[in-house]
Amino acid sequence: MSHLWLKGKRRWFAKPLRGQHVTLWRLPGYIRTNPTLSWDRGLMDRLALHFRRSLKTGAWSLMTLDTRVLVSGAQVSCCVLKDRDLIEAPDEGPVLCAEEAQPGVELRLEIPRSGIIKILFAIESPPRIELFPGPGEPAICARCGSFIGQDDPAVECPRCDAWHHQSTEEPCWIACPTYTRCDQATELNVDYEWRPKY
């Protein structure tokens, strides 16, 4: 699962990119939040960064209406992101994150007031047990072939996004040392191999 490294007050922290789109807004005052992108003028003025994953390729792209946003030093309005791309945006106040995967859940990110918000896009992500987000149709476990229901403990493969059961009763993810389809190591509780150093 791809994620964003966001520079907090004292350290960088990882924010996984779940679902098909994630939006970061600046909060120069009170704003209405909505995880679904809408190109009305009121939201356009406040939209900072919109991340969208391609259903066809799985690649993440960035869209923004702020002409001051840089990706790895280049001014962009839309681009496909590469591993470890540095995204820089003007700091207009606190940042709010809204996710398609968790509608109605908003995360306030405490970003230091330095004038520039720095975000690193990264592809590498360690496997983690989480509750299968659903809703909708349940996924099929890539190891055992049975359904994974909403809120069942499961692991999404960081390389190929395939879901697996992971509980005491159904330890599908850790059943073998590696996942057979993409050779991803199945060890749990490992940290990120790469972290930002600046």
Image (spheres, helix red, strand yellow):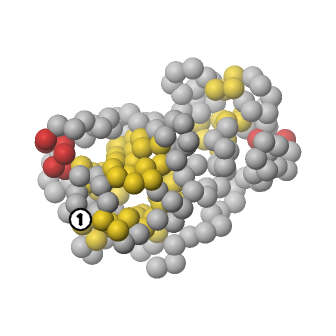
Residue at 35%, 68% (x, y): give it. Answer: 74
Secondary element at tag 1: loop
Q: Is residue 33 above or below residue 147?
A: below
| Side (left or right) of 194 relative to 102 | right
**Picture coordinates of residue 169 (x, y %)?**
79, 31
Residue with the most extreme bottom position:
198
Residue 174 seen in this snapshot: no
Residue at 25%, 40% (x, y): give it. Answer: 33
**Picture coordinates of residue 26 (x, y %)?**
24, 55
Q: Is residue 36 above or below residue 67?
A: above
**Picture coordinates of residue 57 (x, y %)?**
56, 42
Q: Is residue 161 above or below residue 24?
A: above
**Mark 1 lies on residue:** 68
Residue at 54%, 61% (x, y): give it. Answer: 83
Q: Is residue 59 above or below residue 90?
A: above
Type of residue at label 1? Answer: Arg
